[in-house]
Amino acid sequence: MTRPHIVIIGGGFGGLSAARKLKRADADVTLIDRTNHHLFQPLLYQVATASLSSSDVTAPIRHILNGQENTEVLLGEVTAIDVARRIVSIDNGEHEVKYDYLIVAPGSRHAYFGHDDWEPLAPGLKALEDAAEIRRRFLVAFELAEKEENAAKRDAYMTFVIVGGGPTGVELSGAISTIAKKGLYRDFRHIDTRNANVILLEGGHRILPTFPADLAGSARRSLEGLGVTVRTDSIVTDIELDAVSIGDEKIATNTVFWAAGNVASPLGKMLGAEVDRSGKVLVNPDLSVPGHPEVFVVGDLALVNRPDGRPVPGVSPAAIQEGRVAAMNVRRQMWRQETKPFRYFNKGDLAVIGRSRAIADFGMVRLSGRIAWLLWLFVHIMYLVGFRNRLSVFIQWAYSYLTYAGGARVITRSDIHKRTNTTGSP
């Protein structure tokens, strides 16, 4: 008798946790991803700010799953899903994979709210390529300022605008300000990087809206203590090569980073289910797609509500839990058992602002400052995939804490060539 074939789309937190949960399943498992690595997104901003290298936050998917004899990994981009025929198409139909059960966990991308033309001017942070581009622009900006004789242009090079006051925007702005003011100022002769102007723009009334107001206020004060200018109720209306507009006001800058929102993968619309405005699939309580009990959606693509009606947040612990539940529900279907609904267990929310500064929300317990920062360090070290990554990151963090020196401040000739021959902005 032919064993069931389970296909998993995506090697992120949700897809990888599902694959691991199926290690001993009496089935053949195929995991498909457009890259060959699992990315630890919570630390991606440190790659973008030259604090860590890309190898510190990635692990080869094949290596992670090489002990699972029932699992294979395919490198390719899923471009179509035919739920009627139960077929997944890879790379525009060059390869097709049939499935008996499907777990869809492709993640999300940054959303520009109808202004996709802003993306080349204000890159977001979701993939290694994004982090490399942000790091390039961040480092090249100081190099260009070092050579610039015009004071206004030099100030524009040293002005960094981050759009979006969620966790990514807060972490990115705090890291940029810390590195500029503490780590780089001895490296240049004609500019003082401590004069860098880091501006965090948030369209809402406060930053970190998913955190309690008192912790968000603490985070804002910490950012301002690091030299970041935090501006709330500031909706960006235009982004140009050399400026960001907030209504009639223009901020002169050559470097803008986007952290204002996410949009779900377009694969969700191929499943024949209802989706919300951001493209998330409205799934059943057991994470299956209405009308297709053999298809499950997890992670950023799934819209599932908690008992109080609030949606499950798009964070890595939620994706991990969803991946495990989806995998177990697949096994229950194989065993002819009834599937079980997903119940999200909130382990708490953490956000780091800068060196020795973080906030933590565990419901009844709220922490800020050094204690929250140490807790953030411990949690992220433990969630990293692979002992080598944990050891490497720990050593680099310890070194950076003592010296403020980063370990990945490399600019290649192609970086400079790209800067001077394409967009005209760092």
Image: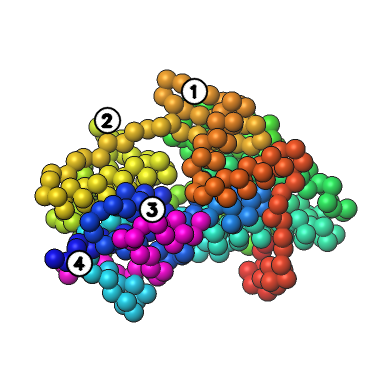
- For residue 81: magenta? yes
Disc 4 element: loop
| Residue that label 1 marks | 366
State which tag comes first along the sequence, 3 or 4.
3
Query: In the orientation shown, which residue stands out farthest toward the left?
Result: 336
Q: Are marks 1 and 2 in contact (CB under 8 Å)?
A: no
| 3D distance between C-alphas at marks 1 and 3 | 31 Å
For the residues carrying marks 1 and 3, which lies nearer the camera in this image? 3
At label 2, the amino acid type is Asp
Residue 264 appearing in the image? no
Name the residue rendered at 12%, 46% in the picture. Answer: 337
Disc 2 element: loop
307 or 67: nearer the viewer: 67
Q: How many marks?
A: 4
- For residue 419: magenta? no
Quarter of the figure that contains the N terminus: bottom left
At label 4, the amino acid type is Arg
120 or 242: nearer the viewer: 120
Q: Is residue 371 above or below residue 400?
A: above
| Magenta highlight range | 59-85
Query: In the orientation shown, which residue stands out farthest toward the top?
Result: 364
For the residues carrying marks 1 and 2, which lies nearer the camera in this image? 1
Q: Which quadrant would residue 113 be assigned to in this image?
A: bottom left
| 3D distance between C-alphas at marks 2 and 3 | 28 Å
What percent of the width, then of the height, locates residue 215? 52, 27
Specify the label residue 347 is tagged with: none
| Residue that label 3 marks | 16
What percent of the width, then of the height, locates residue 326? 26, 48
Q: Is residue 246 left or right of residue 365?
A: right
Q: Is residue 35 above or below residue 338?
A: below
| Residue that label 2 marks | 308
